Amino acid sequence: MPSDSMPSDTAPSDPAPRAAAVVSALRTLELERAGLAALAAALDGPLGDALAKAVDLIVAAPGRVIVSGMGKSGHVARKIAATLASTGVPAHYVHPAEASHGDLGMIQTQDVIFALSWSGETPELADLITYAGRFRIPLIGMSSRENSALIRAADLGFVLPAAEEACPNGLAPTTSTTMQMAMGDALAVALLDARGFTAQDFRVFHPGGKLGARLSLVRDVMHRGEALPLVPASARMGEAVLEISTKGFGCVGVVEGGRLVGIVTDGDLRRHMRADLMALPVEAVMTRDPRSIAPDALAAVALDMMTARGARKIMALFVVDAEGAPCGLVHMHDLLRIGVA
């Protein structure tokens, strides 16, 4: 038994430290939000002009975007390079210190260099800057100081507005790295838009994981051919029930003139249960103009259609071609299997 003088493990914690932590966190977010607001305002001026020129420069470049930075700017540079690469812009991170010891050979004259330094005076970038000038490699610099060595040497400068760091000592890069990251995202998305980069293009670079699954196409997961449960509009319900039972999808599509005109589901059978059900014409039971999807649609769109708010939830979705003919069927179990749902 713990003594009365010992604190209990289950005793509520003192709310004062928690309150102080929340106040500190809110102050951090407020300062970083102010930094982003200043960045947005700057994009209405010269910074926006520089961004537009950078997009044109990178789109026209036959090589890659070489992103570099030191310290916290280096971590941001790595993320920017990864984002550019994942959105179809060939990009690579080069550590500025390693560049001075042989990695400059990784940079070609067809490339564009994008160097980050909040102060613009990072000494480790000096050899990279010199190399860019010597071989006339376009250099984009990003700094908060217009008269810094980086911006003076750059062919194109992103001059970010000054901002107060969230660190109470004004030392740890916080607001500044948030602004650098946001500017990198702005550049990446502007390039994405300029190049007409689509979700299908994005899928090429993201085949794995949850994102890759959501970017799968319906045609990649749909059932086709003899597996499709289909009956003609002239059929009786006995034939439709047999097709539902045989194919095992809990539904059957009704076809007329080669086009999908209706669907009968297990639920329809329950709602129309009566002694002469099997003798009824399929058209008397089917749901007309059922939801359907194109084979080149994203699997994630199929999931959204099956689970749409305000609509009856469905387990299967027929896939139709441009003429409305059924060419496949995608089931909720298929989406679960590949990780979309």
Image: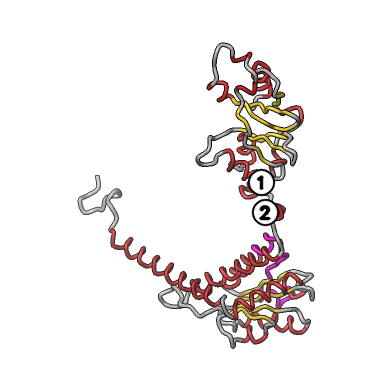
Residue 307 locus on image (x, y percent): 55, 39
Is 45 drawn above or below residue 15 in the view shown? below
Q: Which residue is at the front of the view, 164 or 278? A: 278
* Distance CA(mark 1)–CA(mark 2): 9 Å
Q: Amino acid at mark 2?
A: Ala
Q: Quadrant of residue 103?
A: bottom right
Residue pictured at 62% horizontal, 86% vertical: 149
- Of the image marks 1 and 2, the number of the one nearer the N terminus: 2
Q: Which residues are magenta?
A: 83-103
Residue 155 locus on image (x, y percent): 69, 82
Number of the label disc, if any, that sits on residue 96: none
The reply to whether the C-beta atoms of the residues labelled 1 and 2 are less than 8 Å apart is yes
Which residue is under mark 1? 298
| Quarter of the figure with the C terminus | top right
SS assignment at label 1? loop
SS assignment at label 2? helix
Is 211 drawn above or below residue 125 in the view shown? above
* Mark 2: few/some/many CA within 10 Å (<14, 14-19, 20+): few
* Mark 1: few/some/many CA within 10 Å (<14, 14-19, 20+): many
Residue 238 locus on image (x, y percent): 65, 15
Residue pictured at 63% horizontal, 78% vertical: 49
Which residue is under mark 2? 199
Q: Amino acid at mark 1?
A: Leu
Q: Quadrant of residue 122?
A: bottom right
* Magenta stretch holds residue 42: no
Relative horizontal placement of residue 239, taking residue 314 as reference (left or right) = right
